[in-house]
Image (spheres, rainbow, N blue to C red):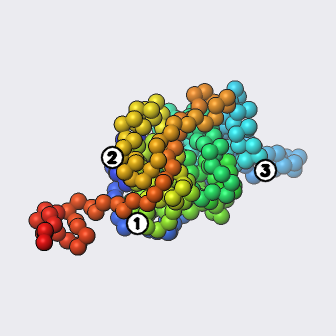
């Protein structure tokens, strides 16, 4: 999950710039293990193999009063969701992608909260997840929906390393591609039916980054919190200028989780030529602080 204090492409404290982006490409891998799995059998004096089970890390499995909901949401993919939960509450915490206080509530606040968004996504859709961070919601959607084709876009090296390792460890290489770079750099390289983002930026900036990655007729699904209604009212004009339709606030997982997941849905209605970067014009470099000559 991308830190909500920073946007897609902004750097958090102590994080280095990603340098040149890689489109497409993957970072070098290193193995991730799954703590909590059954250890290899050992021999007893009677020469019988007895499996030794390592205790589960906190948060690796859902709380007992929430397990039925998690199993209903993930279905036969629940064991794979549990594998991802183990990665998040162990390696994800150690590497600073998940806060230690989030580990005990990883299922309620993160995994299931993201997975229920799949009810808004049609079969076989292509998805770009902007500012993927720890893989929320991108990897979660791939776990819940093997029919989806997902690209994770993340600018920071330590996060893309984790994403690539997690994808490999979970066996999701055929459905997920990890791309290191900023959303605005990715716009000319690929488009998707659905673009997702969770806790990345206010709606105006988010639309500016995500709508160029969206097919005309496709949708931006922004996972938001209590600020959703206020953001829609404040940024509706900006969204329209960027080619988006009227933002709609949707609730996912109603009747399953409380509170349900709040999603701002924006349909892309048309392509818009993005403005030139500050200090530049259509003719290339400008000489007087970005002014253009009049003929």
Instruction: Please report whichever mark, 2 or 3, sits nearer to the chain's N-terminal start.
Output: 2
Q: Nearer the viewer, residue 75 or 103?
A: 75
Q: CA distance from mark 1 to mark 2?
A: 20 Å
Is disc 2 placed on a helix, strand or loop? loop
Q: CA distance from mark 3 to mark 1?
A: 45 Å
Total labels: the figure holds: 3
Q: Which residue is mark 2?
A: 13
Residue 93 can be seen in this image: no
Instruction: Please report whichever mark, 1 or 2, sits nearer to the chain's N-terminal start.
Output: 2
Q: Is residue 103 left or right of residue 271?
A: right
Expressed as whole percent of the image width and height from the top left, the position of residue 62 reads 66, 34
Q: Which residue is mark 1?
A: 21
Q: CA distance from mark 2 to mark 3?
A: 44 Å
Expressed as whole percent of the image width and height from the top left, the position of residue 289 reads 13, 62
Q: Residues within 10 Å of mark 3 (few under 14, many from 20)?
A: few
Q: Is residue 133 above or below residue 248?
A: below
* Residue drawn at the location 74% of the way across and 32% of the way down: 68
* Residue drawn at the location 34% of the way across and 56% of the way down: 16
Q: Residues within 10 Å of mark 2 (few under 14, many from 20)?
A: few
Is disc 3 placed on a helix, strand or loop? loop
Which mark's residue is nearer the viewer, 3 or 1? 1
Which mark's residue is nearer the viewer, 1 or 2? 1
Q: Residues within 10 Å of mark 1 (few under 14, many from 20)?
A: some
Q: Is residue 64 above or below residue 243?
A: above
Expressed as whole percent of the image width and height from the top left, the position of residue 191 reads 51, 62
* Residue drawn at the location 70% of the way across and 28% of the way down: 64
Q: Is residue 83 left or right of residue 47?
A: left
Expressed as whole percent of the image width and height from the top left, the position of residue 1 reads 49, 45
């Amino acid at each position: 999950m991308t830190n909500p204090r920073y946007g897609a492409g902004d750097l958090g404290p102590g994080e280095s710039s990603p340098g040149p982006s890689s489109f497409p490409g993957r970072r070098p891998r290193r193995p991730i293990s799954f703590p909590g799995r059954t250890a290899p059998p050992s021999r007893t004096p009677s020469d019988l193999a007895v499996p030794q089970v390592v205790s589960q890390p906190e948060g690796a499995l859902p709380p007992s009063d929430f397990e039925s909901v998690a199993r209903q949401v993930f279905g036969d993919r629940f064991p794979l969701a549990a594998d991802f939960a183990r990665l998040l509450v162990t390696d994800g915490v150690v590497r600073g992608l998940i806060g230690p206080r989030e580990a005990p509530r990883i299922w309620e606040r993160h995994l299931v909260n993201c997975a229920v968004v799949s009810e808004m996504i049609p079969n076989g859709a292509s998805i770009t997840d902007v500012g993927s961070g720890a893989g929320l919601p991108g990897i979660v959607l791939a776990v819940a929906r093997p029919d989806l084709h997902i690209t994770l876009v993340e600018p920071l090296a330590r996060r893309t390393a984790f994403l690539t390792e997690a994808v490999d460890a979970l066996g999701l290489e055929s459905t997920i591609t990890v791309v290191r770079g900023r959303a605005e750099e990715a716009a000319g390289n690929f488009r998707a039916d659905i673009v997702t983002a969770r806790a990345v930026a206010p709606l105006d900036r988010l639309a500016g980054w995500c709508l160029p990655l969206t097919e005309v007729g496709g949708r931006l699904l922004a996972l938001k919190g209590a600020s959703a209604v206020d953001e829609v009212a404040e940024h509706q004009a900006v969204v329209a200028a960027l080619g988006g339709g009227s933002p709609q606030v949707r609730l996912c997982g109603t009747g399953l989780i409380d509170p349900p997941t709040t999603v701002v849905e924006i349909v892309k209605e048309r392509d818009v030529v993005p403005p030139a970067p500050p200090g530049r014009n259509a003719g290339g470099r400008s000489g007087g602080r970005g002014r253009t000559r009049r003929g």
